[in-house]
Each structure stands twice: as structure tokens, then as C-alpha cells.
Image (tube, rainbow, N blue to C red):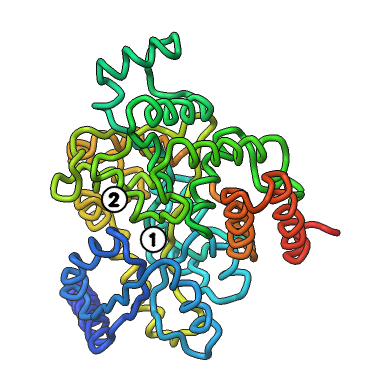
Amino acid sequence: MKKGLKYFLISLVFSLLIIGFSFSQGITLHMLMEDVPETHIIQQLLPDFEKKTGIKVEFETILYSDMHPKLVPQLMSPNCQYDVLEVDNYWAGEFPAAGWLEPLDEYVKRSNFDLSVYIPSSLEMTGYYKGKLYMIPMYNYAMALIYRTDILNDPKIKAKYKEIKKKDLTLPKTLDEYVDLAKFLKKYFGIDGSAMQAQRGDPIVMEWTNYLYALGGSYYDKNWKTTINDYLGVKATNLYIDCLKNAAPLGALSFNLDDAFRVMSQGKAFSYITYWWMLPQLQDPEKSVVAGKVAIAPVPGKGGLNGGWGWAIPKNLPKERKEAAWKFIEWVESFEIAKKRALMGGAPTRYDVFKDPDVLKKYPEYKIVMKVIETARPVPEFQYSAEMIEIVGRELSLAATGEKDVKKALDDAAKELDQLAVKAGLRKK
């Protein structure tokens, strides 16, 4: 009797696996992906997923600036053409608030998916909205200081620094010290001290927010009253513009991520405040002439900007496609694939990947990166985060080009940010 029952159960499990595989046959998952290294790394691993599940995957890769305008109409339509979403933390409040994302709590529970492996700051930033799980952390782009060790240790530069500054040259511990060092290198050695990305919109906001957070400033207080125009906001902006004018490459006002990387990878700058995952790119001799001469550190001061993407499933999908989408998320976030992604230069979000001996052997600096992520802060996440970034980006650009006084620009941004908080129901007028 027991043998018969055992045989029956084995047959049942086997049949369910076949049914599940057959069910997946013919499904093709479509995804809109940002054109960044992480996307290309995952793309190389897709044959493994397709072999295991029979589900095909097609990536549509575009620039970040085109993603939000392309996603929103799809999420508002009766049927989204994308099956798995990658959601920037800028949109981590907007998309769930609009009811566009499938809650994932039940999927996690049913699959015994382990959330405890994720760094808490990543899970809070690109996971939950009002206590419900809508996203699984995909990759992290906290910002850090990447700098040239050969320049910092150059005997001639060290001697000149001591002669002028009357102290030894060391890695800056505060934002004031960082800007001062960047200006010194430009003035006395013609080296761009900081490869900045001050293009209007997202690039300038991302970079400037590090200056704000490094000083201990913030966008809002705990009651959602704007603080962006307080003493710290003004000081951060003045330091940012000072660095832009006196330590950055010519044309940095129109630079984006790729432009700043090009300057740094060509050996024309001492440092830049950028996404930590740029370090493996700079250490790759095929992409960078400064490979082996760069290191990473937290943003000088009180910490930098956290950022990241999360995997999500659109709510306006048929059930069978949602199930196939969850299969993909389970696969791509499994330890096996997350580790492979990390070894290929990806940006992990899991503790067990950051602490894995093979990963640490290849990227010993990940011990520092883990600390950077643990202490970094994201931009405020709410229904109108994207609008907030547009407003701040516009006003910072006007201040940086001299078209508007710094305090006036921040005051104008503050008025509109207060209106957004009221509109979102986070505070009264």
C-alpha cells in the first residue's frame, strides 16, 4: 500500500512538472530594459532560463530617459505589452499608488522566496510600498566616490599639496575637503578634479543629491515640509557649482553618465561621484586606461545617494503571463544567477552574493560597496517622485548656468515640492 502511494506521488510530481513545462511552452516574455551593463549581463544568461522553463525572453533595450514615457501608457492600457518590469526607485511610489503593479506577497509565500538575503536598504527602497511588497530588488546603483590612487600617491602632487595647504594629502573626509582637493588638482596640475555630469534633469539631480546628503541635508522633513532650500541646501548647491566651474571638465554642464565615464576612463580626471557599479568598468583594461589605478570610497561626509531598480509584474496581464513572469523573477534572483551576474560585473543586492568568497576574490572592494549601500539614502519615494526630480533638475540647471540666484532657485523648487506633497496627501496646505 505504502509502495503504491509512493509511486502515485512520484508520478503526480513528475506529471505536474511536465504540465508546468508544457504550460510554459510557446510563451515569450517581453521586457523593456535600460541600456546598462546589468541588462547585457542578464541577456547573456537568458539561454539558461529558456532551457529550464521553455519560456522565451525578448529584451527591448532603450535609454533611461525614454523608459518612463514608454511604460506609463502601457500600464494604463487594458493589456500591457511588457510582462516583467524593471522599476526605478524614482517610480517605486508612483507605480503602486496608481494600482499598476501586481502585489507579490502571495507569490513570495507560495514559492518560499527568501527576502532575508537582501540588504535592508535595497529591499525598503525597491520592495515595499505602504507595507505591501510590489518589487524584488534587481540591482543597486548607490553612488560613491571613485578616485585615482596613482594621483593621490604621486610624490610631486603630494609635495605641492603640502606646500600650498600646509598639511598632508589624504583622501577627503568631508565634502568641503573634496571640492577643495578637486580645485587644487585643476589649478596646479591641469587635472580635472571631478568628472561631473551636470546635464539638466536626472544627471544633475543625481549628482547634486550626494552633495546635499553629504552635508546632512534632505528634500523634506519628517512631516513632508520641504527643506531643500535651507542652509544645508544652499551650501550644497554653492559647493556643487564651485566644483563645476573650477574643477570639472569643459562642457560638464551638458555631460551625462556616459560623458563622465569617458573622461574618467581616458585618464583625464582624478575622481568622480558616480554609481558604484562603474568601478568594474573602470577596472577593465579593455574599457579604461586607468584600470588598476582606481579605488572606491563612500561619498565624503555623511553618506551619499542610494538608488536601485526592482523587478515587478504589471497588474494588467493575464494570469498565465503573470505566472511566467514570476518564474523569470525567481530564476534571475536565485543565488546561482545572482552570483553569476556579480562575477560578470553586475551590481548585487543580496548579502550572500556580496559575501561570497568567489565574488570577493574577484572584487575585494565589495566590502566597501556593501557599506556604501547600507548607509546611503534614496530620494523621497512617493506618487510624484518623477515630477520632483524634474523640478529640482530644472532649478539646479538655472542656478548652475547663472540664470538664477542659488537661493531663489531653491526657494522656487521648494514651493513646487510643497505642492507635490500636498497633492499626494502627505501633508495639509
* Left or right of 406 in this view: 112: left
371 or 214, nearer to the observer: 214
Residue visible at 24% across and 55% down in the picture: 341
* Disc 1: which residue: 112
375 or 127, nearer to the observer: 375
* Left or right of 43 in this view: 81: right
Residue 352 spot, x, y in % from top left: 31, 44
Note whether 239 is above or below 83 in the view shown: above
Q: Could you tell me which quadrant the N terminus lies in?
A: bottom left
Q: Could you tell me which quadrant the C terminus lies in?
A: bottom right
* Left or right of 382 in this view: 326: left
* Disc 2: which residue: 262
Instruction: Give the SS element for disc 2.
Output: helix
Residue 353 spot, x, y in % from top left: 29, 45
Residue 202 spot, x, y in % from top left: 50, 58
Note whether 64 is above or below 300 in the view shown: below
For label 2, the crowd category at 10 Å Cα-Cα, with few meaning under 14, some 14 to 19 and many 20 or more, is: some
Residue visible at 54% across and 40% down in the picture: 240
Residue type beneath disc 2: Arg
Residue type beneath disc 1: Asn
Residue visible at 24% across and 76% down in the picture: 13
* Residue 1 visible, this angle: no
For label 1, the crowd category at 10 Å Cα-Cα, with few meaning under 14, some 14 to 19 and many 20 or more, is: few
